[in-house]
């Protein structure tokens, strides 16, 4: 006969896999399905008859089909990997559990089970799972429950992304993670090219999970509505893929292939990503055709530049990852080509670097506006290309 402890441990393991793992599988499947509709496969086979195609057209078509096939295989591999994930469960000492249950019961919160689990995703601490319900009329916001649990366990916990937002009468599994050491504050400023109605530059500040923030900037080819649509598509697809849990290099290649299959020779966009780890302060910059990024630490400003081609040109993206370690009070400044091109001469990056180093502003929004104003002034008040400035500052949470 199985003891109560062993029975509860088995139930906990099955609970984690069904509630947590299944939700991630569904995210992958949904994004995979949506992404597949972005490929105009039908158009590939409705072109002119084979005998009238040039060798170059045939070669490109075959290459694109091969890339599509490789991507489908990669998606299949990722789904299998998620399905086979193993979670290690760590039980909490019974004495601590009894104290935990008793304290929450006084707040009309009924705890059915509580334990830690780890998934091997390099988080600094394990995730806490609490299966509970409440008899309180109207229930509790889960953020309020997180504050209660933080006091009881002497750990600063926050609800995990994807966790249920409200605690009600129905017994539900809730997940909590350690609050990150840092937070990101951002600000941006944009200017539209003269004679245009919309900007061809797009950006996003995407909270992939509780531990990472991805700053995404894309500059569409040219300007106007076409450039706006292309850069917007790049940013949106990156968000969807990151939301489903794809690694950034894989996501970049997928977005690149969507542009390749767009069927237009000018379907090209740059892509700049700065992925910040909120626990360690480290960041990884992925640059595909993007302008120079600046990292400001007081008066010292570092340039991060990688000279490569935008997305949508070749079937395989050749991009570099540049890793930097940020400290509290550092700022990451991402700009599009329009900002740098406003400065005449060959020392565009140097001119902007010197200006950023002298800035005294602490607000990311104020910094972005000041940089944009400086660039427009350098261009004689004319805006010859779309301009975008995105500033992100790293600050401690405690």
Image (cartoon, rainbow, N blue to C red):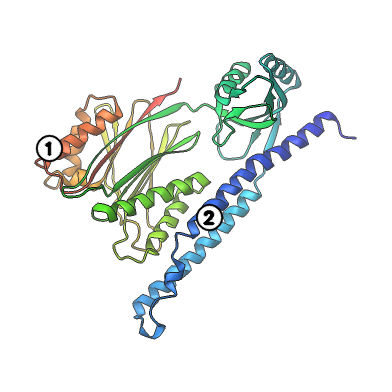
The furthest residue to the left: 380
Q: Position of residue 24 (x, y in %)?
A: 59, 45
Q: Position of residue 124 (x, y in %)?
A: 55, 31
Tell me the crowding category of disc 2: few under 14, some 14 to 19, or many 20 or more residues within 10 angstroms, Cα based: some
Q: Residue at x 56, y 47 (%)?
A: 27
Residue at disc 1, secondary structure = helix
Q: Which of the two residues, 212 or 139, is positioned nearer the viewer here? A: 139
Q: Which mark is residue 2?
A: none
Q: Position of residue 254 (x, y in %)?
A: 45, 57
Q: Which residue is mark 1?
A: 377
Vertical order, 332 against 262 (above or below): above
On screen, residue 66 versus residue 324, left or right, reads right
Residue at disc 2, secondary structure = helix
- In which quarter of the view is residue 258 placed? bottom left
Mark 1 or mark 2, whichever is nearer to me: 2
Vertical order, 276 against 338 (above or below): above
Q: Which of the two residues, 251 or 282, is positioned nearer the viewer here? A: 251
On screen, residue 49 versus residue 138, left or right, reads left
On screen, residue 260 versus residue 141, left or right, reads left
Q: Position of residue 116 (x, y in %)?
A: 66, 30
Q: Quadrant of the N terminus?
A: top right
Q: Residue at x 38, y 72 (%)?
A: 60
Give the distance between the C-alpha atoms of the residues marked 1 and 2, in whole angstroms. 45 Å
Q: Which residue is mark 2?
A: 32
Task: Let me know if residue 395 appears in the view.
Answer: yes
């Amino acid at each position: 006969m199985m003891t109560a402890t062993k029975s509860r441990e088995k139930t906990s393991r099955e609970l984690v896999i069904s509630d947590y793992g299944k939700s991630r599988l569904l995210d992958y499947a949904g994004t995979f399905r949506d992404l597949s509709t972005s490929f105009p496969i039908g158009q590939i086979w409705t072109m002119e008859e084979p005998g009238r195609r040039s060798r170059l057209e045939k070669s490109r078509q075959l290459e694109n089909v091969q890339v599509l096939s490789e991507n489908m295989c990669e998606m299949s591999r990722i789904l299998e990997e998620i399905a086979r994930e193993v979670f290690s469960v760590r039980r909490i000492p019974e004495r601590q559990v009894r104290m935990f249950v008793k304290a929450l019961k006084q707040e009309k919160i009924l705890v059915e089970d509580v334990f830690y689990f780890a998934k091997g995703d390099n988080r600094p601490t394990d995730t806490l799972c609490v299966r509970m319900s409440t008899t309180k009329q109207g229930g509790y916001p889960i953020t309020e429950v997180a504050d209660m649990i933080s006091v009881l366990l002497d750990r600063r916990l926050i609800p995990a992304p994807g966790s249920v937002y409200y605690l009600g009468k129905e017994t539900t599994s809730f997940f909590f993670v350690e609050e990150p050491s840092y937070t990101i504050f951002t600000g941006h400023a944009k200017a539209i090219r003269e004679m245009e109605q919309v900007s061809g530059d797009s950006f996003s500040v995407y909270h992939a999970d509780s531990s990472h923030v991805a700053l995404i900037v894309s500059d569409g080819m040219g300007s106007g509505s076409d450039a706006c649509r292309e850069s917007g598509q790049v940013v949106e697809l990156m968000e969807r893929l990151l939301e489903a849990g794809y690694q950034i290099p894989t996501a970049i290649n997928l977005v690149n292939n969507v542009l390749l299959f767009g069927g237009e020779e000018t379907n090209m966009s740059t892509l700049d990503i700065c992925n910040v780890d909120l626990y360690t302060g480290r960041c990884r910059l992925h640059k595909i055709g993007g302008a120079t990024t600046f990292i400001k630490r007081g008066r010292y400003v570092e340039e991060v530049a990688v000279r490569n081609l935008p997305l949508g040109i070749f079937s395989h993206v050749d991009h570099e990852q540049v890793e930097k370690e940020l400290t509290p009070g550092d700022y990451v400044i991402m700009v599009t080509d329009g900002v740098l091109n406003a400065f005449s001469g060959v020392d565009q990056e140097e001119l902007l670097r010197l200006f950023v180093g002298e800035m005294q502003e602490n607000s990311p929004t104020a910094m972005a506006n000041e940089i944009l104003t400086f660039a427009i002034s350098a261009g004689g008040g004319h805006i010859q290309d779309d301009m975008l400035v995105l500033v992100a500052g790293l600050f401690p949470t405690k």
